[in-house]
Each structure stands twice: as structure tokens, then as C-alpha cells.
């Protein structure tokens, strides 16, 4: 069956954010799809063959829009470009010759395997393809590349007012009525003040004039427990609270095990506290936790401990500089300074007494479970004293180089159940 040619268009102005390299990396693994970024930013990352950058200023882009659409734009904030996403097929028509489909989106996402979802059958049978059930998705929607679909936006009674006004209207999606739609309302029953693309697509679909595909195949929010492996992204939902898992394995997103097309960082990037390792090269397999990226599995002791500490920093606003400086250094593998080092983690509470020993040596990282006697014979070690169950941590001690850090959940007069952090020279 024919492989349809797809091109995604992006516009971004200003310095590129930290997550751009992850977006770019995931684009690389979708080698049969092309990407074009219009930007005024300087890009230091090496671009894959399927990724093209067009240097342009916001002023020049506005002039191009005015010429192509025959309107007079009146905005200075690049965020307004969200309203122009459905118009990209018209604006950038010279770049889309030869493509069967074009799409618009955002760069604050990590792709899985795009072709696993935009299959030949789906593309053959539809004119518009969205990655949520409720509405046309601004962060990723695909349109058939023909004049009728490329000018579908003109069917909105409000399109000229929206495009010429500097105000943002959420035209590319649903006029900001997300929660009404997610609660089960029809787009035609919402409080939207403008006729958005969701209105137009649904109206034309209901009239039988176009075919549209709405499927929930993306992940947003902060589920944690995600893994990327060789271009695949996985999502696993298990029983219990906060048990959502996402795995990304070299370009694909997956759920218990469900594969998804992308993870949207819309909430992750707004976190006050999170940790992103300074990898020289993005590994072929990594996990996306609720507040961090890591090579450690979310259910591992180190994964649970780091997640707990970041959660506490966010919940209580406490200062834990060791999370960004010392803890990653202790846990990081392959560092010459830490070869042959042994780290002991004592997991203790009132009911149980267990130890985990983590050893770094020339062959890698080794973990060992044991009791007090067997681990006690280890002589060179740094110690963490904590609860067996991460949610019940009472005390953590981390000693690394010349810094000794103690976290204590012992009651205090000012905050009876909050962790108190003490950082001092050893």
C-alpha cells in the first residue's frame, strides 16, 4: 500500500527551550515523515535529514501571511500564531508541493512512532486526523493537502476577525472550551465565543462533506512512568492511584502496554521543580517520571526515591540543592570518579529493616538486597536511611564528598509533618 507523504509545519520565535532537543530527537526516529521549522532562533543541535529549518523573523512571517491570506495582521506576540495553525496549508503552500498531508503542532512534545497511528488506512479514509477524541488538537493535527481542506478555516464566520485581531482566540482548537468537551458536551453546546476549527470540522463531518478521525492516542498531564525506547513510546496504566506508566523506547509511546503517538509536555514544562539530566547524548532508552527524566525505572528504589524527593520539594517548597547537584552525581553511571564505589541504602521503618547496596564499578551498576548483617560487612559506603516504602520516609541521610545532607520528617512546631532540610559541611 502507498506510503503517504507527510510534512509537519512549526513556527517558533525566541530562544529555543530545553525540551527542543528531545523533540528533535524524536523527529529523527520518524525518518519517513518530514518536519519544517520556521524560526529566528539559532540552532546548535545537529539536524536529522528529515528536519528542515527556515530562518525568518516574526515581522517577515507576518508579511508573508498578509500576502498569502490577503489580510492585515496586527500582532507582536508569537503565541498568536496558534490561531494561524489551521492556515498553514495556505501560508506555506510553496513548501508543501508533493505532500499528501500536512500537519501543524507544537515543539513541547516527544514523539513516538507516528506511522503506527497515521496508517495508510487512516490516511486513505480521512481528510482531518486529530489525536484526541474531544476536539481538534493544536499540538498535532493532520490535514489532507488539497485546496478544499487547506481553506477549511475560511468556513468559520469569525476567521477574518480572529486572524486580524492581536488577541488569542484558540481558533486552532475549540475556543478554549476544553473542559466542557471533556465533560461530554458537544462543541455546539459549549460557551465558545467564536466558531473554531472544531466547530467547522464537526459541522462538515456531520454534513458528510469531509471525513474526520478523532482518536485518543496521546498523553498529556503528569502521569509519570513513561519510557522511550528506540523511537517507541509506551503508556501503562495499572491499578491504584497515580499508577500511570509511559515508556519511550527509541521513538514510541505505549499503555499496559499501550503505544501512544506522543507525550505533550504542556504541564511538565510548567513545573516549578523538575530534573533533566545533562546527557551528552540522549540515551536509546529513558524514562519520563512525573518530575524528571531518568535512565532509572520508575519502580526502582532510586527512581522512587528521586521522585519522592522532587515531590516533597514541590509540595513543601523546601530547598534541596543536593537533588540537582549531589544525588544525580551519586546515582550517575560511567563516571570515572565513582568507579569501584559502593553506596549503601538502609531502608528502615518500625515494621521492617531492609538494606539495598548499590555498587558502581568497571562493569556497571549492581544492586543487592540483604539484611543488616550481610550488608553491614561492606566497609566503603555512603548511607541513606529511609523507610522501606518511599511514601513513608522518615529520615534520609546522604553523604557525598564533603557534603552531608539530612532530610528529617520528625515533627516540628512550625510544620508537624513537613520534611525539614539541613545542608551543612561534613
Image: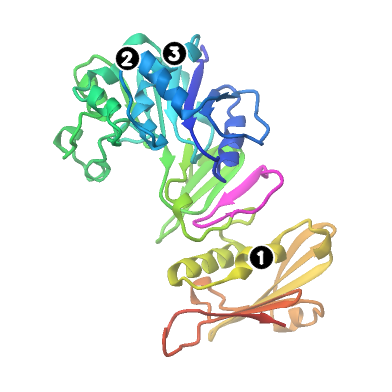
Count the labels in the image. 3
Task: Write the residue at 22% across / 22% down.
Answer: 156
Residue 325: which disc? 1
Marks 1 and 2, Cα distance to the nearest angstrom?
54 Å
Which residue in the structure is indicated by mark 2?
70
Q: Is residue 233 above or below residue 222?
A: above
Which residue in the structure is indicated by mark 3?
93
What secondary structure is the stretch in magenta mostly built from? loop
For the C terminus, give its image quadrant.
bottom right
Magenta-drawn segment? 276-293
Task: Write the residue at 66% across / 36% down.
Answer: 44
Q: Are marks 3 and 1 in contact (CB under 8 Å)?
A: no
Find numbered disc 1 in the image and state the secondary structure of the residue it sits on.
helix
In percent of width and height, residue 213 lies at 34, 26
In percent of width and height, residue 84 lies at 36, 27
Q: Are marks 2 and 3 in contact (CB under 8 Å)?
A: no
Find numbered disc 3 in the image and state the secondary structure of the residue it sits on.
helix
Q: Nearer the viewer, residue 99 or 120?
A: 99
Find numbered disc 2 in the image and state the secondary structure of the residue it sits on.
loop
Residue closest to the far bottom:
413
Is 207 situated left or right of 236 in this image?
A: left
- Can residue 259 be seen from the camera position used here? no
Task: Write the residue at 29% across / 31% down.
Answer: 171
Instruction: Tell whether position 244 is magenta.
Output: no
- Can residue 268 be seen from the camera position used here? yes
Q: Quadrant of residue 347?
A: bottom right
Whichever of callouts 2 and 3 sits on the residue coming sooner in the sequence is 2
Instruction: Tell whether position 288 is magenta.
Output: yes
Q: Is residue 210 above or below residue 343?
A: above
Q: Quadrant of residue 400?
A: bottom right
Viewer-side label of 1, 2: 2
In percent of width and height, residue 217 lies at 41, 37
Amino acid at each position: 500500500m502507498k506510503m503517504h507523504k507527510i510534512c509537519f509545519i512549526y513556527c517558533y520565535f525566541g530562544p529555543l527551550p530545553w525540551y527542543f532537543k528531545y523533540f528533535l530527537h524524536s523527529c529523527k526516529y520518524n525518518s519517513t515523515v518530514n518536519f519544517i521549522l520556521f524560526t529566528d532562533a539559532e540552532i546548535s543541535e545537529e539536524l536529522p535529514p528529515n528536519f528542515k529549518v527556515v530562518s525568518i523573523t516574526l515581522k517577515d512571517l507576518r508579511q508573508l501571511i498578509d500576502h498569502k491570506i490577503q489580510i492585515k495582521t496586527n500582532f507582536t506576540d508569537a503565541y498568536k500564531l496558534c490561531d494561524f495553525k489551521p492556515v498553514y496549508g495556505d501560508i506555506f503552500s510553496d513548501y508543501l508541493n508533493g505532500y499528501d498531508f500536512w500537519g501543524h503542532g507544537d515543539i513541547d512534545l516527544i514523539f513516538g512512532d507516528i506511522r503506527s497511528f497515521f496508517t495508510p488506512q487512516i490516511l486513505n479514509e480521512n481528510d482531518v486526523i486529530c489525536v484526541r477524541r474531544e476536539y481538534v488538537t493544536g499540538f498535532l493535527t493532520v490535514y489532507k493537502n488539497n485546496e478544499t481542506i487547506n481553506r477549511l478555516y475560511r468556513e468559520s464566520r469569525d476567521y477574518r476577525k480572529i486572524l486580524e485581531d492581536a488577541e488569542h482566540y484558540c481558533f486552532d482548537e475549540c475556543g478554549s472550551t476544553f473542559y466542557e468537551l471533556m465533560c461530554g458536551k458537544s462543541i455546539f453546546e459549549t460557551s465558545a465565543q467564536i466558531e473554531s476549527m472544531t466547530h467547522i470540522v464537526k459541522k462538515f463531518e456531520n454534513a458528510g462533506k469531509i471525513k474526520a478521525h478523532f482518536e485518543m492516542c496521546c498523553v498529556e498531564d503528569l502521569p509519570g512512568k513513561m519510557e522511550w525506547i528506540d523511537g517507541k513510546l509506551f503508556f501503562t496504566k495499572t491499578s491504584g492511584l497515580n499508577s500511570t506508566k509511559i515508556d519511550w523506547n527509541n521513538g514510541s509511546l505505549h499503555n499496559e502496554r499501550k503505544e501512544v503517538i506522543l507525550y505533550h509536555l504542556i504541564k511538565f514544562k510548567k513545573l516549578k521543580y523538575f530534573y533533566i539530566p545533562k546527557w551528552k547524548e540522549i540515551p536509546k532508552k529513558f524514562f519520563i517520571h512525573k518530575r524528571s527524566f531518568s535512565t532509572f525505572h520508575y519502580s526502582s528504589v532510586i527512581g522512587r526515591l528521586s521522585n519522592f524527593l522532587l515531590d516533597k520539594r514541590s509540595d513543601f517548597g523546601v530547598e534541596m540543592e543536593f537533588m540537582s547537584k549531589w544525588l544525580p552525581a551519586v546515582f550517575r553511571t560511567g563516571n570515572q570518579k565513582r568507579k569501584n564505589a559502593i553506596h549503601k541504602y538502609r531502608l528502615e521503618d518500625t515494621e521492617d529493616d531492609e538494606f539495598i547496596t548499590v555498587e558502581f564499578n568497571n562493569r556497571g551498576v549492581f544492586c543487592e538486597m540483604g539484611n543488616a548483617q550481610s550488608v553491614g560487612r561492606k566497609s566503603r559506603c555512603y548511607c541513606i536511611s529511609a523507610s522501606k516504602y518511599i511514601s513513608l520516609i522518615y529520615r534520609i541521610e546522604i553523604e557525598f564528598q564533603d557534603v552531608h545532607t539530612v532530610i528529617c520528617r520528625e515533627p516540628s512546631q512550625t510544620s508537624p509533618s513537613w520534611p525539614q532540610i539541613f545542608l551543612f559541611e561534613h
